[in-house]
Image (tube, rainbow, N blue to C red):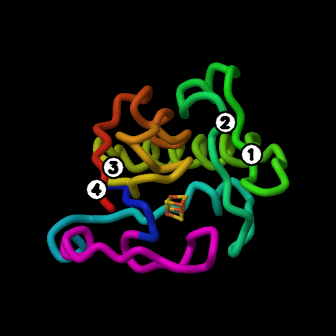
Amino acid sequence: MILVSGCLLGICCRYDGSSRPNPDVMALVYRRNILPVCPEQLGGLPTPRKAAYIARGDGFDVLSGTARVLTVKAQKDVTDAFMRGARECERLARLFGIKKAILKSRSPSCGLTVQTGVTAAVLILAGIEVLEAG
Ligand code: SF4
């Protein structure tokens, strides 16, 4: 089973209520067992919601307490919700014995290469192979 960012499967869970369906990722549904998740929704945030970013670091820095997640305009601190969602994803991954995740690029939760998101960092530290798709 693979844990996948819900927006890559066409689920409208992005901050602006849109999705980012990725044909290659969606094709996996026919070959593998897929667990779609949206960490920000699992953390209790609404959809749509305010866009957010990681200030002064990446997801690993958020976990160590040296960076925070803030909304773009109002600079409201939403770190706790992002942490809660990341931990819920980790809980689901452990429950289903998941060893691999495909997460959405350029997201403060799911991003990997440009800036590692909070959920990506939690899953990496849990020993899960994390891949990225746009
Ligand atoms: S990138 Fe991650 S947190 Fe953002 S909408 Fe997609 S699944 Fe949810």
The question of residue 25 being in magenta is answered with: yes
The question of residue 92 being in magenta is answered with: no
| CB of mark 4 near ligand 1 (< 8 Å) | no
The residues tagged by marks 3 and 2 sit, at their Cα atoms, a distance apart of: 25 Å
Identified at 57% across, 73% down, the residue is 13
The residues tagged by marks 1 and 4 sit, at their Cα atoms, a distance apart of: 32 Å
Residue at mark 3: 101
Of pointers 2 and 4, the one earlier in the residue sequence: 4
* Of marks 3 and 1, the one in the foreground: 1
State the SS at label 4.
Answer: loop
- Left or right: residue 3 versus residue 66 is left
Q: Quadrant of the C terminus?
A: bottom left
The residues tagged by marks 4 and 3 sit, at their Cα atoms, a distance apart of: 9 Å
Neighbor class of circle 3 (other Cα within 10 Å; few <14, some 14-19, many 20+) is many
Residue at mark 2: 55
State the SS at label 3.
Answer: strand
